[in-house]
Amino acid sequence: MKLLYGVISLLLTPLYLLTACWSAPQDSRGEIARQTGLDLSGGEEISCYDTHSGNGDGISCIVWQFPDDRVLEQVEQDARWEPLPLDETEQTLAYGISGDWGSMGPYLTDEEGKALLPQVEEGYSLLLDRHQEAKEGEDRAQILERYSFNLTLALYDSGTNTLYFCEMDT
């Protein structure tokens, strides 16, 4: 009987792995809309970088392009979105900062340490602290003092009608 179970397991394991590898990718539109409050209809996902593993840790950056400024109008009406330039915490996460004391960041990078976000000169940012220790009204600098990160940083480039949506989970 043990031999039969072993044979069945050996036959089903490859089938399970194929199913897991070939499953349809999660639709990013719904999750981005939920977190940012934006209607992404009419836009097109033009790139997706994701290192999230089975345990949920990783970094992702999804880029959406829009043919007009309809999303800009939504961003401007949502008080959570702030006009650029980025504050120090956002700057550190996206591009890194340096001074006489040394340097810190960037955190939103690919496997080679290259920043995932381009320099956006004109637009808006949205930083969402999804960490379990996050408190309403807490100073954003607290994010960088934690041992782990669960956050979303979204940038809307109003010059190119492009949305950059990045998540970091550690």
Image (cartoon, grey):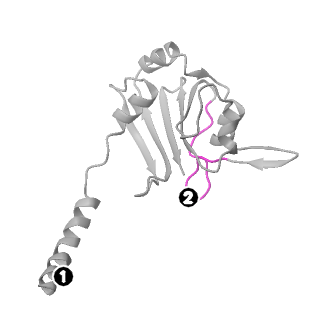
62 in relation to 16, above or below: above
Question: Viewer-proximal residue, 119 or 136?
Answer: 136
SS label for mark 2:
loop
The magenta stretch spans residue 107? yes
- Report which residue position mark 2 lands on: 111
Q: Residue at x 32, y 45 (%)?
A: 26
x, y percent for residue 99: 84, 43
Q: Residue at x 69, y 48 (%)?
A: 105
Q: Residue pushed farthest bottom? A: 3
Specify whether residue 95 is in view.
no
Q: CA distance from mark 2 to mark 1?
A: 38 Å
The stretch of residues the image draws in magenta is 106-120
User: In this rendering, would 37 be left or right of 108?
Assistant: left
The magenta stretch spans residue 170? no
Residue 6 numbered tag: 1
State the image quarter where residue 7 is shown.
bottom left
68 in relation to 116, above or below: above
Q: Residue at x 63, y 41 (%)?
A: 94
Specify whether residue 121 is in view.
yes
